[in-house]
Amino acid sequence: MLHFQTHLHDEAGTAALGASLARALAPGLTIYLHGDLGAGKTALTRAMLHAAGHEGHVKSPTYTLAEPYTVQLGARRVDIVHFDLYRLASPEEFLDAGFREHFNENTICVIEWPEKAEGVLPAPDINVLLSISGDGRDIELQALTDQGSQCLDRLKFAPNL
C-alpha cells in the first residue's frame, strides 16, 4: 500500500496539505488521525473541510464528539463527519451514540483519537500520523486499503522547502 511522508514547517504547510488532501478525497473513506494534543489533527481537518468547500466555522468536536459537514466533491454532495473521541469514556459509548451509521459508502469519516473506540470503530482506509517536530510537524499518511491507496495516489502535494 502507498504511504506519504513529509515535514510541514508551519501552519501554512498544514493548511496546504489539508487542501491537497481535500482534492483527493472520495466518498466512503475512513481516515484516522493520530497524534498528541496540539499535533495538528484539527488544523488539518479544518483546512481539508474549507478546501472541500465548507464556508463556515469548523470547530473541534471535543465535547459533541462528532460534527457533520456537507461539501461538494466534484459534481457530488458528500457528508464529512469529523469525530473527536478524546473525551469518550469507553468504546461502548461510541456504539451507544449511534455513530456507526455514519460509516458508509457515501460519507467520509475523519476520526481524531480513534484508539478511544478501539474494537468497535470501523477499520481505516488511511492512517494519518502527526507529530510535533521543532517549529513544525512531521506527517505520515498510510494507505491501508485499495480505496486509501487510490486517495493517496490522487494526492498532489509539494511541501514548501
Image: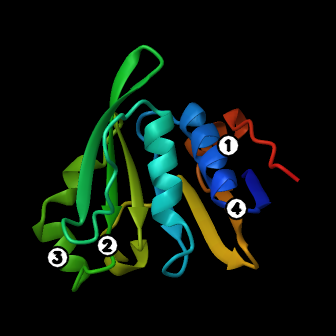
Report if residue 124 is visible in the image.
no
Q: Which residue is mark 4?
A: 10
Q: Residues within 10 Å of mark 4 (few under 14, many from 20)?
A: few
The secondary element bearing badge 2 is classed as: loop
Residue 20 lies in quadrant: top right
For residue 93, the mark is 3
Q: Residues within 10 Å of mark 1 (few under 14, many from 20)?
A: many
* Residue drawn where x is 25% and y is 46% of the image: 68
How many numbered circles does the render carry? 4
How far apart are labels 4 and 1 at the CA level? 22 Å
Residue type of the residue flagged with mark 4 = Asp
* Residue drawn where x is 55% and y is 76% of the image: 35
How far apart are labels 4 and 3 at the CA level? 35 Å
Q: Which residue is mark 2?
A: 85
Mark toward the start of the polypeptide (1 vs 2):
2
Residue type of the residue flagged with mark 3 = Glu
How far apart are labels 2 and 3 at the CA level? 10 Å
How far apart are labels 1 and 2 at the CA level? 25 Å
Q: Residues within 10 Å of mark 2 (few under 14, many from 20)?
A: many
Residue type of the residue flagged with mark 1 = Leu
Percent x, y of residue 159: 80, 49
Circle 2/circle 3 CB separation < 8 Å: no
Mark toward the start of the polypeptide (2 vs 3):
2
- In the image, taking residue 89 as reference, residue 113 lies left or right, namely right
Circle 2/circle 4 CB separation < 8 Å: no
How far apart are labels 1 and 3 at the CA level? 31 Å
Q: Which residue is mark 1?
A: 152
Mark toward the start of the polypeptide (4 vs 1):
4
In this view, the residue in front, 31 or 21, is 21
Foreground label between 1 and 2: 2
In this view, the residue in front, 12 or 4, is 12
